[in-house]
Amino acid sequence: MKRNIKLTVSYDGTDFNGWQVQTNGRTVQGEIEKALGIIHQEKIKLTGSGRTDSGVHAKGQIANFYTEKDNIPADKFTAALNSMLPRDIRILKAEAVSDEFHSRFDAKIRIYRYYIKAGGSCEPWHDRYCWRTRHVPDIGRLNRLAAPLSGIHDFTTFTAAGDPSKSKIRQLYTAAFTIEGAFLVFKIAGNAFLWRMVRSLVGTLMQLEEGGAGSDEMRRILTSLDRSEAGTTAPARGLFLEKVLYDERSII
């Protein structure tokens, strides 16, 4: 009997060429599919909730696969896969879900966090997971600049060239900076994101704040629909896919 297994996956993206399988380069999907292939003695297709770019990390990526192997309880796939996976990928949870569940198409809200160490020194083990900047920004000004991003907008300005999406319209529920310990953190939640959109937003906001831009400047850039208006793209190492929600009523 075929079962649909949902995985919650955490990974350090530093040494991966992103999530999606590619002809060249190591990928997270590729490593998990390799382990599934060993368990099943056949190729198993893994579907992720979305693609993270090269160097981007995840605390709660969601994926699913179908199995006809009936001698492994759903929750035991956690230990079985972890025993075969490299140290920079861990399955946090495995569970049986309905046959209709699709990790990508059923996702309602995706939450990312971007970590910035502004000014001062950084612990050496944090250097792979944050963007270090000399400038210490004014968090109030950053949030005033970010305020126009919430809602439904065309995010063409913040899309990398080559993004295949037919529509660049996305809905953001949250886009705000907070202080978490020694880090400045940008939390962003939306129904979906364009290629490199979050990193483009972070880089542009930081650049505008440092340049003393007025509160309406981000709104002007957003509505211009002109990619040349966007600022620098923040490095991948500070970005984490925090979690994926499948209920729009979930508290974010």
Image (cartoon, helix red, strand yellow):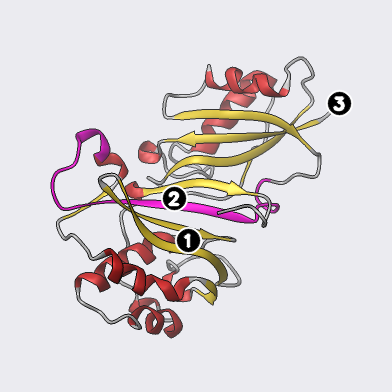
Residue 98 screen position, x and y as percent: 80, 39
Q: Distance between the residues labelled 3 and 2?
A: 35 Å
What residue is disc 3 on?
1
Residue 128 screen position, x and y as percent: 28, 40
Does residue 121 belong to the magenta stretch? Answer: yes
Q: Name the secondary structure under disc 3.
A: loop
User: Mark 1 packing: few (<14 Cα in 10 Å), some, or many (20+)?
Assistant: some
The quadrant of the rendering that contains the C terminus is bottom right
Of callouts 2 and 1, the N-terminal one: 2
Q: How far apart are marks 2 and 1 (CA)?
A: 8 Å
60 or 20: nearer the viewer: 60
Does residue 146 belong to the magenta stretch? Answer: no
The three-letter amino acid code for the residue at tag 1 is Trp
Q: Name the secondary structure under disc 1.
A: loop
- Contact (Cβ within 8 Å) of mark 2 with mark 1: yes
- Horizontal placement of 179 versus 13: left or right? left
Residue 43 screen position, x and y as percent: 67, 29
The three-letter amino acid code for the residue at tag 2 is Asp
The quadrant of the rendering that contains the N terminus is top right
Q: Say which quarter of the image contains residue 68.
A: top right
Residue 140 screen position, x and y as percent: 30, 68
- Image point 67% across, 38% down: which residue? 64
Q: Name the secondary structure under disc 2.
A: loop
Numbered circle sitting on residue 195 = 1
**Image height check: is 231 above or below 94?**
below
- Image point 54% across, 73% down: which residue? 151
What residue is disc 2 on?
53
The three-letter amino acid code for the residue at tag 3 is Met
Q: The magenta stretch spans which residues?
A: 103-126
